[in-house]
Image (cartoon, rainbow, N blue to C red):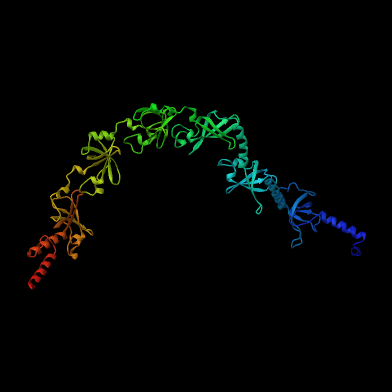
Amino acid sequence: MEIYKDLSSPASQQFEKLLNGQLSKNKIEEGKIIEGKVTKITSKYIFLFIPGLKSEPVIDINEIKMIGMADNVKEGDTISVLLEKIEDRNGDVVVSALKAQKIKGWNKLVKCYENNELINGKITQKTKGGVIVEHLETGSLMFCPGSQISDKPVKNIDHLIGVEQKFALIKLDMVRGNSVVSRRQVVSSNKKEDKVKIIQTLKVGDVIKDAIVKGYSSFGCFFEVTTSEGTIDTLCHLQEISYSRVNHPDEIFNIGEKHDLKVISIDMEKLQVGCSIKQLSPDPFEHISNYEIGKEYSVKVEKITDYGCFCSLEPGLSTLLHSSEMSWTKKNVSPKKMFNVGDNIKCVITEIDTEKRRVAISHKLTQENPYSKLESSYPVGSEIEGEVSNFNEYAIYLKLGDFEVDGFLHSNDLSYTGKPDEELKKYKRGDKIKVKILEIKINEQKVRVGLKQLQKDPFDWFKDKKVNDPITVKVISSDNKGLFVKPEGCEVEVLIKKSQIAMNTNDARPSRFVGGERIDAAIAELNLEKRKVTLSIKLLEEIMNAKAIKEHSSPLSGKNLPFSSLSEQLDDKQKKKDKE
């Protein structure tokens, strides 16, 4: 022990030098990756020797299997481990080979990310929102979002799983240790290099043969162009498709069709090629003066849509035949049922707009207007036989005579006296009905007919009547609203409201009547034009009372009026007169 007391002695200084040299050689710190030498391998553990530690660290054999080294490791080999604790509560050294591998892998990823280098990896499995990618050098697992798998939608990625390929690191989370990669950037980058080579083979003015329609949008049509250097997509803008007005490319093209294109622009910065179809032919509107409005021409059906047919007057000069201009009589025309692509049909030009470069045509104008023909043969007021062709909840449609015209027969025009909904139920398809033409609107293609107009109007019974006239009526039925009555000799049913049954409120009860009674009432309101009449028993009472009181006649017997209010008023007036 004396050697340590005298540090100036040569022996002490030599010992201090040896001790410091050994400690500086093996700097032991927790959280650092150090190298350990395999000294012993059992079925469960691997024992390591690390200079500077008081005991041998032990690694579970399962951990070695997880990092794929179980078959290769042998005694004497060196393994990198993470020193987690120099001494735990049991006095043991705690190390981890798995964590050491993860840290080394992360450091490599960080270096590749900082240097913008691509990494080798393979997709191992699908997950929500994307796929898991394994870094082949370190075994680190990374996430690739679904949007970064390819530069175009891919429905099935099974062919990509397990295949070694390049990925670009696009995001590293240093705190959580997460990494995000992209396959799309690599694919797009490769395509960009190829795209440059392809575009360099083209120049403005070139004519590309047999470009394939790949897709379209509201602003143009995309074509697939094949050159000696490969394939590239080009855009033909909506305005460059045709000299005529085009609303959408699907009016002209079908997917998979082949068309010739003319190169009109090349942008090497954006790597875009602009093409035109219409510039391959002369502008047909330069000689549009050869066509006249109102004249009949033969056109060829080029394309059929739900709302019409696109036809050509001549190559390059297209026009729209709208479905509303196909037939005079057919409603909601289906163009596909009337015409086929390639048909030559007769049409009349209805409009030429040189500013908008638009030509409008009509097929129905080449045929006689059946509504004009009907009007000349059966003017308003004429009688014609029709066959029931259709119904709705409030009307009947009749095919009139031999004309391809449907007449509209409203339920209110079926009968003067019957209820409209009940009258409507009396008819079925195929029934023949003789009707009167009430109205013909040629421009609107409408014809209105009536059935009751062929019958005598029962309302004419009131023509020689006026307001306050008394009439005798027969009670048909009663309900909470009042009395339903018919004037004698008339088929018009009229409602006497509950408030108009009697002057005395207690007597104004519809339940007093059971039906079949003959009573008198007065006309309270009469409008012959609107066919409206209002009857009132109360009004008749008031008129008769006033007349009796005025003439000081004896009380009425009440033969026609079943109430006693008038007699009571006369008695009161007589008593007052006696007092005077």
- Residue 573 locus on image (x, y percent): 10, 68
Tell me, yes or no, if residue 275 can be seen here: yes
* Up-down relation of residue 157 to residue 211 (above or below): below
Query: On the image, which quarter does residue 322 sit in?
Result: top left
As drawn, which residue projects farthest toward the bottom? 579
- Reply above or below: 526 against 221: below
Q: At which x and y percent is residue 293? A: 35, 30
Residue sitting nearer the eye, 274 or 442? 274
Give the image location of residue 142, x and y in percent. 64, 48
Please give left or right for residue 446 compared with residue 2 in the image: left
Measuring 61% from the left and 34% from the top, which residue is drawn there?
196
Q: Is residue 569 above or below residue 184?
A: below
Q: Residue 285 in the image: state x and y as whole percent.
A: 43, 29
Which residue appears at 44% of the width and 37% of the height? 247
- For the residue pair 303 and 530, the one nearer the viewer reads as 530
* Picture quadrant of residue 498: bottom left
Count of numbered badges drawn on the protein: 0
Task: Say which residue appears at 14% left-offset and 65% top-offset.
Answer: 565
Q: Nearer the viewer, residue 268 or 401?
A: 268
The quarter of the rendered structure image containing the N terminus is bottom right
- Is the C terminus in the top left, top right, bottom left or bottom right quadrant? bottom left
Q: Residue furthest front?
A: 355
